[in-house]
Image (spheres, grey):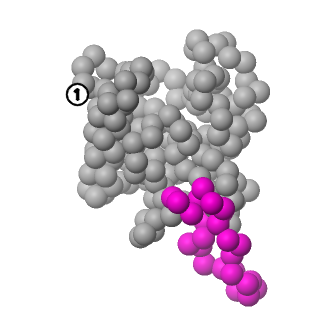
């Protein structure tokens, strides 16, 4: 599934990247970003933030516009957590890599940056699937799920009915269930189209 991010989304990703880099320095966090200098590190952060926005746009989810890097990127209305991992088009392996210290989410989505403003949603895996893979077999301290083992992002099992902004089916007469507390704090004022 290919997603195009227009200028507004790219500007949001740039702001997210700059804010996250600044906040990590303020908190004295260990810098795990790739790159030789601050500019390259911010570029990598931009690619990751844009990957999150591609998922947000596709599934009409509220992105985490804050600076809390390293936590779940989305909390679905039913309370499940989703983390997005983005790889660049020139990466050697287009596989889902999750650090052993960061396997706390319910699902992981792999996004590939394929061009200037284009992002491909490669697939997703459940947290159980990720945690079941051996650590360090391919990359030190990481779980790895090969791209061909990921589930299709068009799969309705995971995303269907998880977003309050969906229109109810004609046969439904009652409103959707109330949001859980964590999700209420992350609702968007304006849903992405």
Q: Is residue 61 visible?
A: no
Element at badge 1?
Answer: helix
- Corner quadrant of residue 26: top left
The picture places residue 134, in percent across and down from the top left corner, at 72, 18
- Corner quadrant of residue 42: top left
Give me the residue at 52% from left, 23% from top: 93
Give me the residue at 60% from left, 15% from top: 141
Q: Nearer the viewer, residue 145 or 179?
A: 179
Give me the residue at 64% from left, 13% from top: 136
Up-down: is 26 above or below 50? above
- Left or right, 133 with reference to 181: right
Q: Which residue is mark 1?
A: 39
The picture places residue 103, in percent across and down from the top left corner, at 65, 31
Q: Main secondary structure of the magenta part?
A: loop
Q: Nearer the viewer, residue 26 or 13?
A: 26
10 magenta-colored: no
How busy is the neighbourhood of tag 1: few (under 14 within 10 Å), some, or many (20 plus)?
few
Up-down: is 120 above or below 6? above
From which residue to which does the magenta span run? 162-186
180 magenta-colored: yes
The picture places residue 114, in percent across and down from the top left corner, at 39, 39
The picture places residue 193, in percent across and down from the top left corner, at 43, 68
Up-down: is 60 above or below 176? above
In the rendered image, the residue lying farthest to the front is: 27
- Left or right, 3 with reference to 162: left
- Left or right, 86 with reference to 176: left
């Amino acid at each position: 599934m290919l997603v195009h991010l227009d200028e507004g989304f790219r500007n949001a990703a740039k702001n997210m990247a700059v804010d996250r880099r600044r906040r990590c320095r303020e908190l004295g966090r260990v810098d795990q970003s790739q790159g030789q200098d601050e500019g390259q590190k911010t570029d990598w952060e931009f690619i990751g933030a844009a990957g999150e926005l591609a998922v947000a746009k596709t599934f009409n989810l509220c992105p985490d516009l804050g600076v809390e890097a390293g936590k779940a990127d989305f909390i679905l209305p039913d309370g499940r957590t989703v983390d997005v991992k983005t790889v660049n088009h020139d990466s050697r392996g287009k596989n889902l890599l999750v650090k052993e210290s960061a396997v706390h989410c319910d699902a992981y989505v792999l996004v590939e940056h394929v061009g200037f403003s284009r992002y491909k949603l490669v697939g997703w895996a459940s947290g159980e699937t990720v945690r079941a893979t051996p650590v360090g077999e391919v990359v030190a301290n990481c779980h790895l799920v090969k791209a061909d083992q990921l589930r299709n992002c068009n799969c309705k099992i995971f995303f269907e009915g998880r977003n309050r902004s969906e229109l109810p089916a004609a046969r439904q007469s009652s409103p959707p269930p109330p949001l859980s507390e964590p999700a209420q704090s992350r609702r968007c004022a304006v849903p992405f189209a």
